[in-house]
Image (cartoon, rainbow, N blue to C red):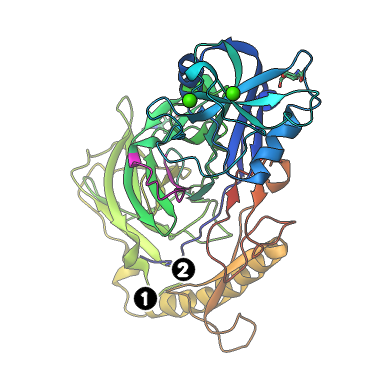
Amino acid sequence: MFYGITIFVLNFIQIVSSQPSADQWHIFEDALYLVDNDTRLNYDQAQSYCQELGGNLARIDSDEIQSFLTDIVSPGFVPTRCFFIGANDIEDEDEFKWQDGTQVRYDGWSPGQPDDTEGNRDCACLWSSKNPSRHGQWDDTNCFNRMNFICQKRLYNFTLTSSRSNPGSGYVTCAVDIVDDNEILPPDDIRLSVGKTLASTRSIPYSSTRVIGQFRDSTFEIDNLEEDDMIFCHVGDLSRNTTSFSRIQFLPINFYALPGLTFSPAVDDIGSTSLTVTWSSWIPCLDTGEGPVVSYLVYVQTTGKELINAGEVDSDEGEGALHGTMELALTELEPGTEYNISVSAVREGVGGEGPRSPFVSVTTSIVSARRSAILENGILPWIFFGVSLAGNVLLLVVIIKLCRRRKKEPFQTRSLKGVRTTPSGSVPNDDQYEVPRARGDGEDHLYEGLRRKSSKYSEAEGYISMDGPDRVEYVNTIM
Ligand SMILES: *[C@@H]1O[C@H](CO)[C@@H](O)[C@H](O)[C@H]1NC(C)=O
Ligand SMILES: *[C@@H]1O[C@H](CO)[C@@H](O)[C@H](O)[C@H]1NC(C)=O
Ligand SMILES: [Ca+2]
Ligand SMILES: [Ca+2]
């Protein structure tokens, strides 16, 4: 590869906090609570309802959760109401258990409860009452009573990362914090969906997944990605979007600008059936787009025919020379025929081919090939060599100036293979080559409900520091 640069640029992430649920679900620590003061269901129905929403009837196992929920049901309802929670002793009398089967250890009972009145009070509820000895505390009640209830669901923390890619493809890693009561989230539960809107997404299967520490890291490769596609990482079903907070949204991937050659190629050695196409290798800052360029494709078109790809030239051939001259011999051409010839540069990665250069128009000769007299002369090649050497040095200085001027914006330093430094000291140290960083639009994004996890990054710019890891993390803590 000619230019061994790899630039990762992070993407900016935002969460969607869907409106209907935002009113009803309350976040506390790593869970969400829905205190439903409207729907009245019996205990089993209430539990099914919570499951539909991706949760369970609430588990209360600390003073903190108990007082958090008490605040929500305050001031006390008149007439009093008791909200079903997850504890019941249906199986064994006086052995209260939560929905996950674990024993109830925390004592949130109102004085004198549970009392199992009439021997059929097996389902726990939390009082909202004007009576302070009851308010915010538990009672055991009849499971067939139709009452309000409190659901709880797990809130997942996401870390979404992506590296830049060529247009049309994306590589996204979604890491989800899975440590909770030693729960290991199955890989299929972490999903990635892509689409113009939340409602019209297509699901992308993961290409790899692994558990690292407390995170499950799943990597997704996305094809046919369009510029305005949204990317969502979520746990569980996205169609239940009105209730899911465990979701994170990517803005569209920040694509690389594909490389383009500014000038048309030249032609040489024009014969009746062959010619040689030559062109200057792609040069950062002078040509358009971003490298590294790994190869070139030569296109040929003749009147009334389709444009055809006449061959590919590996850019390695220009290695060692700053300003490499690439060439490709075309044969089996028609004599006396006009051809349009252009060249495209291809950057590394899938879908890296840039736009075609302006074309050169050439007509093959009618009779046998005539050789260029110049090339048969013995001195001229040496003159050319001298000129091109001087030209290369000059070009290097120009490029460095151009590139440096563009570097007002944050940049990243990477070692660039194949670029020589001049001895003058006017170039960067240690054959390091400064590459201007493409500008993201970090300011426009919403971070609603998202907290940036790391302080390694420049908050204002949203760019990674030069020696920082190539990603930014957000966790979906909803404020
Ligand atoms: C009932 O719940 C809704 C939604 O959370 C809330 O807006 C309303 O204030 C609650 N009603 C009472 C009386 O607390
Ligand atoms: C070359 O391109 C020009 C401009 O697009 C077009 O007018 C001409 O017909 C082309 N010639 C051939 C041989 O394709
Ligand atoms: Ca009981
Ligand atoms: Ca009771």
Residue in the picture at 48% in, 35% down: 234
The magenta region covers 169-187
Residue in the picture at 44% in, 59% down: 292
In x, y percent, where is residue 119? 48, 19
Residue in the picture at 26% in, 48% down: 311
Front position in the image: 50 or 103: 103
Q: Please give the label number shown on residue 381.
A: 1
What is the three-letter code of the residue carrying label 2? His
Front position in the image: 101 or 317: 101
**Could you tell me if residue 227 is visible in this image?**
no
Front position in the image: 42 or 3: 42
Residue 248, compared with residue 161, is above or below; it is above
Secondary structure at badge 1 equals helix
Does residue 151 belong to the magenta stretch? no
Would you name the residue on which mark 2 appears? 323
Residue in the picture at 70% in, 60% down: 409
What is the three-letter code of the residue carrying label 1? Pro
Secondary structure at badge 2 equals loop
Which quarter holds ligand 4? Answer: top right
Residue 119, compared with residue 70, is above or below; it is above
Residue at mark 1 to residue at mark 2: CA–CA distance: 17 Å
Residue 303, compared with residue 323, is above or below; it is above
In what quadrant of the picture does the N terminus appear? bottom left
**Could you tell me if residue 295 is visible in this image?**
yes
